[in-house]
Amino acid sequence: MNSSLSVYNSLKGEKEVFKSLVSDHVGMYVCGPTVYSKVHLGNCRTFISFDLIYRYLNHLGYKVRYVRNITDAGHLENDADEGEDRIAKKARLESIEPMEVVQRYTVDFRNIMAKFNALPPSIEPTATGHIVEQIELIKEIIAKGYAYEINGSVYFDVLKFNKDIPYGKLSGRNIEELIHNTRTLEGQSDKKNPQDFALWKKAEPVHIMRWPSPWSDGFPGWHLECTAMSRKYLGDQFDIHGGGMDLKFPHHECEIAQAESINKIPPVKYWLHANMLTLNGKKMAKSTGNNILPEEMFSGSNTVFKKAFSPMVVRFFMLQAHYRSIVDISETALEASEKGFNRLLEALQTLKNLTPSNSTTEFDFKSWVARCYEAMNDDFNSPLLIAHLFDAVKFINAVANQKQAIDANDLHDLKNHFDAFFYDVLGLNSSDRETTKDDSQLEGTLELLLQIRNKARASKDFETSDLIRNTLSNLNIQINDAPEGSSFKIN
Ligand SMILES: [Zn+2]
């Protein structure tokens, strides 16, 4: 593969030329959701960012194996090793099976991602489906001497690991700092050192999610599943590991330690992290009420915004920021995105109907295409690509108004490139708009039928008025006659 793609590698803190381990192939692992509640809008941003990356690698011609896990066990309330399992807690509160919680929120997550037009990953493995692999991995780490068992639980020995291989490479934390900053939680843990982390936890009698293991009936530590599953599906070394910025520490740092403790080689060539989303200038959090669910945005039933915003407008809004920058969501920003998105959709339509002229193209088409690729090759700079698309929109509109010209060849190429960037790379589509258009056409037609029926009734032409009422009724459209006028209801 001969592309000039460069990516910002969080491990090095700089941009690097992207070269896959196996030519033409890319292995990419992204930490997926913990399915204990409805997916957060901030999480959606992470997955939309990696959808953009996945789409662009595909567009460049790579065969990408994209693995994104579903965490359905082992993620405790505290990202360290304390507290109740998030899924078990929800199951307890709602008196349902943990797997009902998992099923409900996995389905919700997939529905929302489909609305955002995010492509499904190649493999979507679950933690509970890989208990055997996780137990085998723990055995390997113990055999290498980097983990120890105490009272049925197994912990990773961070200090011992750090003597042989430096710990903290990704997050830039050194071990002394960690020792200094970690509180000892008296009586809450069997760990030798507070910075050690759990690979296996013995289940308390009340803990309902448990599996047999050589050490105890228990459950895997949260960081373990990603190492077990990425190794299984992508090998000991793979190209890209992604996730939200908040996962750098401890989650990704622990993943690196687990993998390196076994074979001493870095498991991942490029670590990519997507930044967070804020709402009206503040961090989104359920506890403060500064929070909104994706479906509340789509339906408009929320107290944060005055109107509904479609999934494509929200996606477009997110792609107007670089995936590594913090982006703030607000009514004004969304409205501006909506206008911009509609301009792009109109240009797509105009482009379809453009006619070429005999004179030469008055637009440096080749350099425009090069600039679009340059933007995406520069660490997936989608806001810059979108700015270039708007340059083309100006030209498209000028051609439509016969102020500028395009020849047949360039018109053909412009259509292909514009479509490829809009649909394939940015993953946008025009389905929202088509639905809105259909709705308004249907409503207009029904209003006309009501007017005709009112006229018929006024002139006592009951044959016509009944014909309209009965035909609509057969189509599940009800006419209601009231003193203030007739109205219709689509069932
Ligand atoms: Zn993970």
Image (spheres, rainbow, N blue to C red):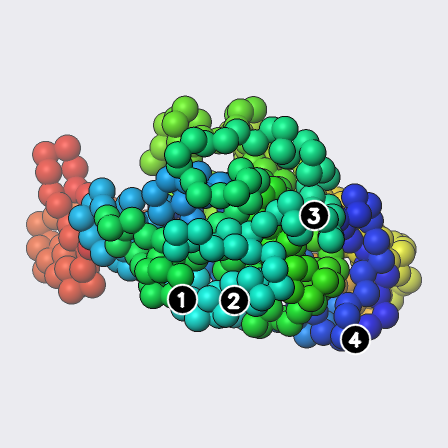
**Amino acid type, mark 3:** Asn
Q: Which residue is found at the position 72% from the left and 48% from the top?
A: 163
| Residue type beneath disc 2 | Lys
What kind of residue is marked 4?
Ser
Q: Earlier in the sequence, mark 4 or mark 3?
A: 4
**467 or 369: nearer the viewer:** 369
Q: Are marks 4 and 3 in contact (CB under 8 Å)?
A: no
Say what amino acid the circle numbered 1 marks: Pro
Quarter-of-image position of residue 387:
top right
* Disc with the residue nearer the chain's start (3 vs 2): 2
- Secondary structure of residue under mark 2: helix
**Element at label 4:** loop
- The label on residue 23 is 4
Q: Residues within 10 Å of mark 4 (few under 14, many from 20)?
A: few
Compared to 64, does 202 lie above or below? above
Q: Which residue is mark 2?
A: 139
Of marks 1 and 4, the one in the foreground: 1
* Tag 3 residue: 162
Mark toward the start of the polypeptide (2 vs 4): 4
- Mark with earlier residue (2, 1): 2
Q: Earlier in the sequence, mark 3 or mark 1?
A: 3
Mark 3–mark 2 Cα distance, whole angstroms, equals 20 Å
**Residue shown at the point (53%, 38%) measured from the top left:** 194
Left/right placement of residue 242 relative to residue 375 reads left
